[in-house]
Image (cartoon, rainbow, N blue to C red):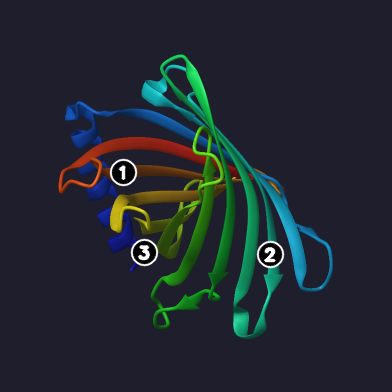
Amino acid sequence: MQKKLLTILSILTAIFVSQVARADDWGDLWTTLNSGTTNLSDTFSTKSHLELRLPDTEEVGYVRFSQKFYTKLAKGWKLGSHPVFENSKKGDDWNHTFRLDLELNPGKFKLGEKGPSISMRNRWELRWKEGKGSEIFHRIRQQTKATWKIDAGPFKSYSIANELFFEEDKGKLTINRFYPIQLGSKLNEKIKATYYLLYQSKRAGTSSNWNGAYILGTSLSF
C-alpha cells in the first residue's frame, strides 16, 4: 500500500509541477506559523496562528493573525472561536478586515484498517471590512482532508484535501482550494513542518467564470 501511495504521489508531483511551470498565474508563496497548544483547563485550550503571503514571491502582500480557542465536546467534537485580524495589500494601499471565526468540527476517523484518517473543518466567518462600516459579511467554509502515514525519508505523512468557500451576500461558491500534495515532516522533537502544493480557483464576481492560481506553501508548528 505504501509503495502504491508513493508511486501515486510521484505521478501527482510530476503532473502538478509541470502544470505550474506552464501556468501564467502562479508563484505565490504562503507561510504559516503555529504556536504550541496551551491548555487552559481539561477541555479548553488556545494557540496562536500567523500567516504571511507573498504574491508572485516578491514581497509580503497579506498578513493574518488569529488567536484560536477550542473547547472539547462529547464524542470527539470540538468547538472553536477565533478572533482574526487580516491586512491585505492592493497596489500601495493596505486594507484591514476583522473576523470572528466559529467552528464545529467532528473528531478524526479512519477509513478501514489500512485506509486514511479523515478530518473535517466546518467554519463560519463573520467579517467586518475596512470602509464598509458595521456591515457584516458572512462566509461558510468546509474542508475535508485524507491523511496517510508514510515513511519516505524526512516525510512521515501524505495528505490530500479540498476546501469550499460560500459567501452568503453573493449566494454562491466563490473559492475552491484543492491540495493535491501535503507532506508532513518532523524537524525535531518540538517542530513539525508541512509542505504543500495548492491550486486555488476564484470566481470572478458573481459570474460563472473562475480564475485559478498555483500556490506553494509551508506550515510550521512549534
Q: In front: mark 3 or mark 1?
A: 1
Dot 3 or dot 1: first in sequence order is 3
Residue 76: assigned label:
none
Work out whether residue 7 or residue 62 is closer to the camera in this orientation and state it: 62
Q: Give the amino acid type for the residue marked by disc 1 in the picture.
A: Gln
Position of residue 39 measured from the top left corner of the image (x, y, whole percent): 80, 62
Q: SS at mark 1?
A: strand
Mark 2, residue position: 70
Q: State the CA–CA distance, disc 1 to disc 2.
A: 28 Å
For the C terminus, the image quarter is top right
Q: Residue at x 56, y 65 (%)?
A: 103
Q: Residue at x 41, y 63 (%)?
A: 142
Residue 169 x/y as whole percent: 36, 54
Q: Amino acid at mark 3?
A: Gln
Under circle 3, the secondary element is helix
Q: Choose the circle earlier in sequence order: 3 or 2.
A: 3
Question: Residue 35: x and y, percent?
Answer: 70, 46
Mark 3 and mark 1: Cα distance apart in space: 28 Å
Tell me where residue 168 sits by quadrant: bottom left
Residue visible at 19% across and 34% down?
18
- Which residue is labeled 1 in the image? 200
* Mark closer to the chain start, 1 or 2: 2
Label 3 environment density (alpha carbons within 10 Å; few <14, some 14–19, many ≥20): few
Above or below, 214 relative to 12: above
Task: Look at mark 3 in the image and give the residue it sits on.
Answer: 2
Q: Residue furthest right?
A: 41
Q: In whole angstroms, how far apart are the C-alphas of marks 3 and 2? A: 34 Å
Q: Which class describes the residues within 10 Å of circle 1: few (<14), some (14-19), or many (20+)?
A: some
Q: Quadrant of the N terminus?
A: bottom left
Left or right: where 210 falls relative to 76: left
